[in-house]
Amino acid sequence: MADQTITIGHKEFTVACQPGEEEYLRAAAEMLDAEARTLLNQIGRVPAERMLLMAGLMLADKTAESEDRLRAAQAEVAGLRDEISRLHSRPEPAPREVEVPVVPDTLTDSLSELAARAESLAEDLEKRARA
């Protein structure tokens, strides 16, 4: 086991840890130190035991809050996964029939004939108007 020196609230502590866990210990110590410094800035000088207890409780409170948020997020993810599964297992909707109106050829022919007659009448009127 390797001994590591960590600083919490301006106080140094020597802690033993397993080889390879030094980074984890340093990260945990930095989190505890941040809480201890916040506490010392608010309250001032306190005994080491009380400082560590209160900083630990502050971290525990943050951890509990994070766990609550994690549980809520996991529940939401589970609900969304259920919804996705439900939507995927739903049968495909029946194809919709769309009716497109078709103009009969006889009507098209009749309208073309009427248009030709109207143009002919317009030309006759223009000739008479010029004369």
Image: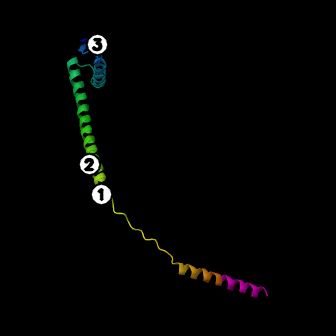
Check if residue 94 falls in the magenta segment: no
Q: Label 2: state its secondary structure.
A: helix
The amino acid sitting under disc 2 is Asp
- Residue 126 drawn above or below residue 88: below
Local crowd size for mark 3, using a 10 Å CA cut-off: few (<14), some (14–19), many (≥20):
few
Q: Which mark is residue 91?
A: 1
Q: Quadrant of the N terminus?
A: top left
> Which one is closest to the eye, mark 1 or mark 3?
1
Q: Which residues are magenta?
A: 118-131
Number of marks in the image? 3
Q: Which residue is mark 3?
A: 5
In the figure, is residue 67 to the left or right of 131?
A: left
Residue at the location (24% across, 25% down)?
55
Nearest the eye: 42 or 86? 86
- Dividing the picture into quarters, in which one does residue 18 lie? top left
The percent coordinates of residue 124 (x first, y second) are 72, 86
